[in-house]
Image (spheres, grey):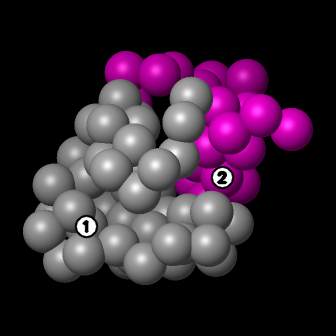
Amino acid sequence: MSNSEKYKKIFCKTFDMKSNFDENLEYNSIEAWDSIGHMNLISALEEDFKITFETDDIVDFSSFKKGKEILKKYKISF
């Protein structure tokens, strides 16, 4: 599985999304992506990609696309 597929799968699983996934997804744009959902997402990403986010990156992680930019800082390529 590619990193792009893994990344999308984590979003879909964390936010219980099936066919309605949209790469323009942003924080608080769906009910599931609230503060608790955000921390669940961060935890899943850290576990699956074997990284530890810096606090600033957790705060800045505001969309699906921004998340890809942040993950590149941790040597995750897409």
- Amino acid type at circle 2 is Ile
Residue 43 on the magenta segment: no
Residue pushed farthest front?
75
User: In the rendered structure, does residue 21 fall within the stretch colored magenta?
Assistant: yes
Residues in magenta, as a range: 1-29
Question: Residue 66 placed where, x, y %?
Answer: 28, 37
Q: Quadrant of residue 29?
A: top left
SS class of the residue under badge 1? helix
Q: Amino acid at mark 1?
A: Ile
Reply above or below: 43 against 57.
below
Left or right: 40 in relation to 69: right
Q: Residue at x 25, y 67 (%)?
A: 58
Tell me if residue 18 comes above or below residue 36 in the rendering. above
Residue 23 shows in this picture: yes
- Give the residue at mark 1: 58
CA gap between label 2 and label 1 equals 16 Å
Tag 2 secondary structure: helix
Where residue 25 appears, as percent x and y from the top left, is: 38, 31
For the residue pair 11 and 34, the one nearer the viewer reads as: 11
**Residue 10 numbered mark, or none:** 2
Q: Residue at (16%, 55%) from the top-left corner?
A: 60
Q: Nearer the viewer, residue 27 or 43?
A: 43
Disc on the earlier residue, 2 or 1: 2
